Image (spheres, rainbow, N blue to C red):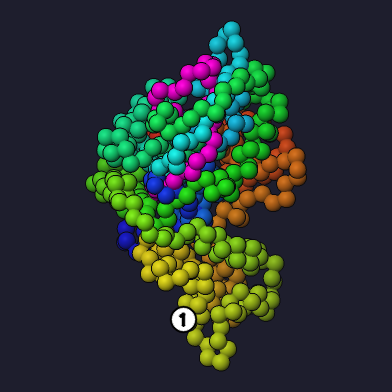
């Protein structure tokens, strides 16, 4: 596939999702109509790259797959690992830590002791900022939909035994931490992933954490767990906490280096599309070795002290300015040529010199309106290329549509633009009541309909669709690795 086509895809996705953490690294892979975003959840347990989705739960759930890695930095804060049956034992092996205590009654690492149905909630404070590798997408979801490709195929070369407990999570954590120590010279402290929230696979608790407290949990709150049973209130409480992270972790707790990340979509032969149209990593292609070398270079690069551009903020401004307007233009509500043309004209009016119309100049003014400073104008990073490509396509489409003299042709052009952008703002719930949450198909819950169009829910069960053919996550286990296929397949 032509490199320019690949770049355009990366660019397109770039506009909705990016977030990086200085001093840590992250991986991404996305489908052609996806955007970036991530969340941190519990177990040991990032098509085009989308900048506004990174480290954001909602975009990364309705746009499932990412094949990207990015440096990230976690500032000092409290963390809570999974509830444990032992009161004072601090993990001595790689384990996950979370930012939401609400999940702990729902899931625990160890089987519940028969004599004691409770567990213990450990709270830690980091000793210093953590250097993390951010793996984009629902990267903690144990499924065959490609959510584990970046870890299992790219980083670990299909070496995980998925029968070794919780779909290979312990082995996955240990191998990635071994890679961090031996191959990357301890340049990262852990792996940042998303599922129903954000989690960190931390490689050495003693080196990075101080104990704040260890408290016994309420045994009655440990219900049926994720994926089944009626909601006794814990399910809604859990999803309310998850929803609070839909648009980011918040508090500046995670920072991404937008100028330095790796996307497998920049290497066309490293990607193929499976029977469902999802992008997958092609471990049979030599191109994947180029991606691995790029990741090594990114992780091992010297941390230069120079100012970087927060491209996610730039992408957010673009989406905030044009999302509602494009949705309105494409809705068909403007049923005459004059009304549709007038509304398109209002969108591009600030960039028109009415004394000397010049479409090229108008597109350039429109596309560059959000780019900050000379450094951003000269940046050659994937994120900057993505922003430029998306804004140029957006603005050129509006200018071209404004010149149309046929209503149907103008409307079709706007609809094509909306389909190209595929922003997740057009799938999110609007107007949920105080006792409702916007329910997303976050592993292992949800139905196929939830993925197509999330809806407000008040009666939240931990497993809508559980036991039915309509369940979205009906494919637990090892990701399907089709090593013989290429991108052109």
* Magenta segment main secondary structure: loop
Residue 223 rendering spot, x and y as whole percentages = 64, 21
Which residue is rendered at x = 41% and y = 38% of the image?
Answer: 191
Residue 450 can be seen, yes or no:
no
Residue 50 rendering spot, x and y as whole percentages = 47, 55
Mark 1, Cα crowd under 10 Å, few <14 / some 14-19 / many 20+, is few
Which range is magenta? Answer: 68-96
Which residue is rendered at x = 54% and y = 35% of the image?
Answer: 78
Q: Which quarter of the rendering shows the N terminus?
A: bottom left
**149 or 91: nearer the eye?**
91
Residue 115, above or below 365:
above
Q: Residue furthest top?
A: 115
Locate residue 226: give its quadrant. top right
Secondary element under disc 1, as helix, strand or loop, is helix
Residue 53, above or below 321:
above
Locate residue 105: give its quadrant. top right
Residue 310 can be seen, yes or no:
yes
According to the picture, the residue beneath numbered tag 1 turns out to be 360
């Amino acid at each position: 596939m032509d490199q320019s086509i690949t770049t355009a895809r990366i660019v397109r996705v770039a506009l909705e999702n990016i977030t990086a953490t200085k001093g840590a690294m992250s991986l991404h892979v996305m489908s052609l109509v996806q955007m970036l975003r991530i969340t941190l959840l519990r177990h040991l347990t990032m098509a085009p790259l989308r900048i506004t989705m990174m480290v954001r739960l909602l975009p990364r759930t309705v746009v499932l797959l990412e094949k990207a890695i990015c440096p990230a930095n976690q500032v000092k804060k409290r963390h809570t690992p999974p509830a444990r049956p032992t009161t004072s034992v601090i993990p001595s092996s790689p384990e996950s830590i979370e930012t939401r205590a609400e999940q702990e009654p729902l899931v625990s690492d160890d089987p519940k002791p028969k004599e004691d149905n409770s567990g213990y909630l450990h709270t830690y404070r980091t000793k210093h900022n953590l250097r993390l590798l951010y793996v984009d997408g629902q990267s903690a979801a144990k499924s065959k939909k490609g959510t584990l490709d970046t870890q299992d195929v790219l980083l670990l070369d299909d070496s995980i035994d998925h029968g070794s407990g919780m779909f290979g999570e312990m082995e996955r954590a240990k191998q990635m931490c071994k890679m961090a120590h031996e191959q990357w010279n301890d340049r990262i402290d852990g792996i940042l992933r998303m599922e129903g929230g954000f989690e960190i696979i931390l490689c050495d608790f003693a080196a990075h954490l101080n104990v704040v407290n260890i408290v016994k949990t309420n045994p009655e709150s440990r219900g049926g767990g994720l994926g089944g049973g009626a909601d006794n209130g814990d399910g809604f409480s859990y999803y309310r906490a998850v929803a609070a992270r839909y648009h980011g972790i918040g508090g500046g707790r995670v920072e991404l280096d937008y100028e330095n990340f790796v996307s497998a979509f920049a290497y066309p032969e490293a990607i193929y599309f499976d029977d469902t149209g999802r992008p997958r990593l092609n471990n049979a292609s030599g191109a994947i070795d180029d991606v691995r070398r790029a990741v090594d270079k990114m992780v091992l690069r010297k941390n230069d002290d120079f100012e970087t551009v927060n491209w996610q903020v730039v992408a957010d401004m673009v989406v905030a300015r044009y999302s509602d307007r494009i949705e309105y233009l494409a809705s068909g509500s403007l049923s005459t040529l004059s009304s549709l043309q007038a509304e398109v004209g209002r969108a591009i009016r600030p960039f028109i010199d009415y004394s000397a119309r010049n479409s090229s100049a108008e597109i350039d003014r429109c596309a560059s309106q959000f780019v900050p400073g000379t450094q951003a104008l000269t940046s050659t990073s994937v994120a900057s290329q993505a922003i430029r490509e998306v804004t140029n396509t957006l603005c050129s489409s509006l200018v071209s549509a404004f010149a149309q003299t046929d209503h149907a042709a103008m409307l079709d052009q706007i609809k094509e633009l909306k389909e190209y952008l595929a922003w997740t703002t057009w799938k999110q719930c609007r107007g949920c009541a105080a006792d409702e949450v916007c329910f997303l198909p976050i592993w292992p819950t949800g139905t196929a309909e939830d993925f197509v169009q999330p809806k407000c829910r008040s009666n939240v069960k931990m497993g809508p669709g559980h036991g039915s053919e309509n369940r979205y996550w009906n494919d637990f286990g090892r990701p399907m690795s089709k090593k013989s296929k290429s991108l052109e397949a």
